[in-house]
Amino acid sequence: MKKNICVLGNSHVGALKRAWDLMTEWHQEYNLVFFTARSNGLGGLILIDNKLVPKTDRLKRTITYTSGGKSEIDIVEYDLFLIYGLQMEVFFVEPGKFFSSAVIKQTVLDSVKGTTSWKIMEMIRSVTNKKIYVGHNPLPIQKKGDDRSYPPESYLSGINLMNDEVYDKCNAELIAQPADTIVNGCFTERELSKGSKRLPVGDAMDEEAHPDHDIRHMNEEFGKKWLSCFLSRD
Amino acid sequence: MNPYSTLPDRAFWKKAVSEKSIFDISNLWSPKFKITKDSRVVTFGSCFAQHIGNALDSRGFNWVSTETPPKGLSQENAKKYNYNIFSARTGNIYTTSLLKQWVEWATGIKEPPEEIWEKNGRFYDPFRPVVEPEGFCSKEELMLSREETIKAFRECIVSSDFFVFTLGLTESWFNSEYGYEYPMCPGTSAGTYLKGIHAFKNQMYPSVMNDLRDAIEIMRHENPELRFILTVSPVPLVATNSRNNVIVATMESKSVLRAVAGQISRGCNYVDYFPSYEIINSPVFKGVFFEPNQRSVNPHGVDFVMNHFFSSLRTKFGAEIFGKQNKRVGSVKKMNDLVCEEEIFDAFGGKE
């Protein structure tokens, strides 16, 4: 019996979706259904009778396209959920800076609870107690001239802190980006951004490449590494 | 012909005041220094200093904070934890002696005391009693946080072009055993008042003057290019321990502070005085800028003061110092958005 995984997200899911299309045959035990919209489009989902329903026709058309025909998300249909991107940034303490534990805890709460990712997680959690995984926006590519370098433990301690303070309490888990995609402790390997394309939503921009100066969107190679790591947890 | 015959209109009451609406009164300040949008400006002092930082920031000037909150902390909670209130997380620096104390810590002339206050398992910094509303989780955390602030305060001294300081109080509390000063009377916002240890001192002109001069000279030694703009808070005392009526105590205190600011700014070409105190408090303005409690300054009053600050710069140095106008112009915060530690005294009032 295939495991149904509901993937919700924004443009960052593009890398995962393109990767999944290439790796489906090696993971036939899973059925991934993507409900995605560019930017903050999924902020337009509302909860009605155990379903996440689009508020607008435009969003309805988009998720119908990305999911392969489903115009709403019936939460009970899925075995687990992956919420990816959607304003979710990982928390870092800049090296050399000191903050009190109270300030750090408050920062973690603030940085999670204002996001669309959190809003969607809350709606799902109000219906089911099934596991919810959360993926943060990919770490950016290091810009030329930016010489920051964080110790490797900074990233993982940020992930652990967010899980301890927020996600553990709601049977959810923030997942770390694979270690082999990270350079200098807080950036994604430059090669994993090359040739990245826009999230396909069924419009004229689907095959467009992200502009050269884009440092936030990754390619399908990144998507493969991320999804392989994610699926290996199961 | 006499010396008065060539003076400008602003020197004569009739021309400067009698013939004008109070809202048209101008030329109260002729700035000594050209502050541009590139100038690095830091602000410290009593509550009213926050308005200057806010106004500079909202008009796109380079107001500098050297102790910024972690990325992701909401603006509301950054304020709760006293980030970006002043240029470092010192809390209010009400007196010139307290300023000197911070300067001495930041420059290594003196070591900060080891005193820590504990209540219900939480730890409070006697020198910044409200920066962490629920206190620190350990003594070590408190000391590390204090070190961070001292480091940030030092960064303000050595890397800024202008140091704006608002003089707030003459009444002060000291540790009589070791001589260091607290920003608040122990036992008010935190700590325990110990009679015989915690000593009250209502500072007079000479000590206020000497401490301010010393603080400025130490800072100039670290950064010879640093220039100062002094202001006096127009906000009356919340409470006085001087045994005087609070009105009398306020007038005495402000008079001392105003005189010191005037003396120093007249005597030093690297110190200026901006008359926010006069704009709010002069009888000419009939108290219109105060809230009904006749203490808090209404946001319109703050705007009036800060508009005067910027219009004076424009008059003296031309509009080019403003560059492109920032879209956030005019977003001066309400007075009740300020972080004023001394408000705690209100909780002890009304016992007569």
Image (cartoon, rainbow, N blue to C red):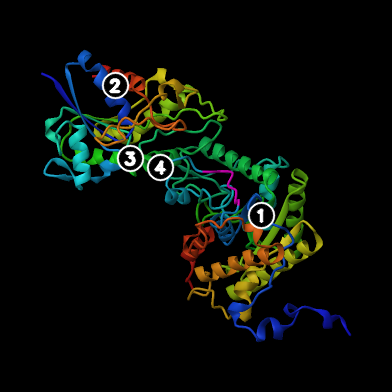
Give the chain of mark 1: B
**Label 2 in the same subunit as label 1:** no
Labels 4 and 1 within one chain: no
Q: Amino acid at mark 4?
A: Gln
Looking at the rendered structure, the secondary structure element under dot 4 is helix
Instruction: Say whether disc 3 or disc 2 marks the residue closer to the N-terminus.
Output: 2
Residue beneath disc 4: A106
- For label 3, the SS is loop
Residue at mark 2: A19
Which residue is under mark 1? B36
Q: CA distance from mark 3 to mark 4?
A: 26 Å
Earlier in the chain: of badge 3 and badge 4, it is 3
- Front in this rendered view, residue A22 or B97: A22
**Amino acid type of the residue that numbered disc 2 sits on in the rendered structure:** Ala
Give the magenta-colored segment's residue range: B62-68
- Residue B185 in percent (x, y) is at 57, 57
Front residue of B232 and B225: B225
Q: Which mark is residue A39?
A: 3
Outermost residue, top direction? A26
Q: Main secondary structure of the magenta part?
A: loop
Q: Tag 2: Cα neighbours inside 10 Å, few (<14), some, or many (≥20)?
A: many
Q: Which amino acid type is shown beneath numbered disc 3?
A: Ser
- Chain label for disc 2: A
Give the vertical position of B89 relative to B248 (above or below): above
